[in-house]
Each structure stands twice: as structure tokens, then as C-alpha cells.
Image (cartoon, rainbow, N blue to C red):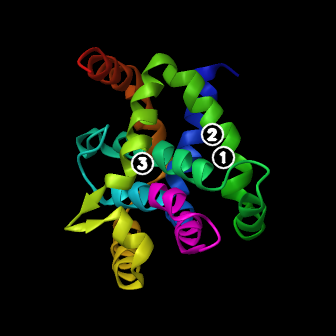
Amino acid sequence: MGARDEFVERHVRAILDLPQDVKATCEVLDDEEIPPERRRLVAGALLGVLQPGDLLPDTWGPLGLLDDVVILRLAADAAAPADSPERRRHAARFPEFWDELPGDLAAARTFFGDTFVLFESRLTRLPLAEHKGKRAETAVLDETVRAWLYDELDQAMTDLELSEDDLYVAMRRIDALMAHLRRRLAHR
């Protein structure tokens, strides 16, 4: 299987699993044994799931979720690094997400190539993320803001209507998406 095919297979699954993956990363946000600076990455990624104009705008249809999926994985990986007690603890509860995480990120890095830096640069700005006046830092510190975030995410995931067939059809536009990312990289 080539890099493109592996990316498509893994990320069709990842987009379909987004509601469950959001739950897995919400638990990371709640884990007070993880240092606050790493939890802010997760809070920022979760806030990003709610924002329509990310690296890939929602006008791309289901492909507009790819940046959310990749950035959510980057944040989770940074918050609970491989072989850490945090990763092992969370992998016991959500094994599908954590077992697939390294392969999903490797497939994304390979497929996106030099444009992957766009995703990585988003990761560095996640602690500054804001949505509807709520900030990533506040979500880490304030249970009320976390409850608001979880309600917003629950509603967004409930409203998400995706089918595997639709995603495979959307993935046919992956070359146009890559051209979009290359333009963004050139204007950086």
C-alpha cells in the first residue's frame, strides 16, 4: 500500500472516529497528573475542532475535518508521550485511539511531506486558542469552562453526519487539498 492509500485508509477511519477520539482527548484534558502546559495543547486542539476556519476550511466538506483530526492527534501525542505513564493510563481506556495514534501520525507526516510543518506550527499555537471567548488556558484551570467545552463538543459531534462512502468520495479531492496546503506554505 502506498503512502497516499495508507493515509486515506487511516484518515477515513479517523474522521469517522472523531466523536470517540474527542472523548479520549477530553479525558486527557481532565487528567490533572498531566502538567497544565501539555493539557493546554489538548484544550486548544479541542477548541479548534469547534472552529470552522482552520488550516482546512469547512468549505472543503469532510476534508475540512482532516486538520482537526491530525492536530488532535499531535496534541494528544504531545500531552501523553509514547511510553509515558499518562499514555499507558489513557490507552487502557481508549485503546483504539492510542494504538492507532503513532501510525496515523506517521501516515500524515509521510503523505503531507513538507506541508506537515503547517500542522506542527498550529500545535505550537494551541495554548493560545480561543472559541466564543473561552481560552485553552481557562479550560485547563476552570471546571465550568471545561463543562461548557464538553457540551459544545458533544453538540458538534452529535451534529456531525458522515458516511464512509462520502468520505472516500471526498478523498478524491486530496490532490486539490495538497495544492491548497502548498499555497499556504508558500505564503508563510
The x and y percentages for residue 1 are: 70, 22
In the current view of this chain or complex, which residue is farthest to the bottom?
144
Query: Which residue is painted at 34% across and 24% down in the image?
Result: 181
Q: Is residue 148 magenta?
A: no
Q: Which residue is mark 1?
A: 101
Q: Which residue is mark 2?
A: 104
Q: Secondary structure at mark 1?
A: helix
Q: For the residue marked with disc 1, what is the amino acid? A: Leu
Query: Which residue is painted at 76% across and 55% down in the image?
Result: 84
For residue 147, above or below residue 85: below
Q: For the residue marked with disc 2, what is the amino acid? A: Asp
Q: Secondary structure at mark 2?
A: helix
Mark nearer the N terminus (2 vs 3): 3
Instruction: Specify whether 128 is left or right of 100.
Output: left
Residue 6 appears in the rendering = yes
Q: For the residue marked with disc 3, what is the amino acid? A: Asp
Residue toward you, 80 or 97: 80
Magenta-colored span:
23-41
The x and y percentages for residue 64 are: 34, 42
Count of all numbered marks drawn on residues in the image? 3
Residue count near mark 2 (Cα–Cα under 10 Å), binned few <14, some 14–19, many ≥20: many
Marks 2 and 3 sit apart, C-alpha to C-alpha, by 13 Å
Mark nearer the N terminus (3 vs 1): 3
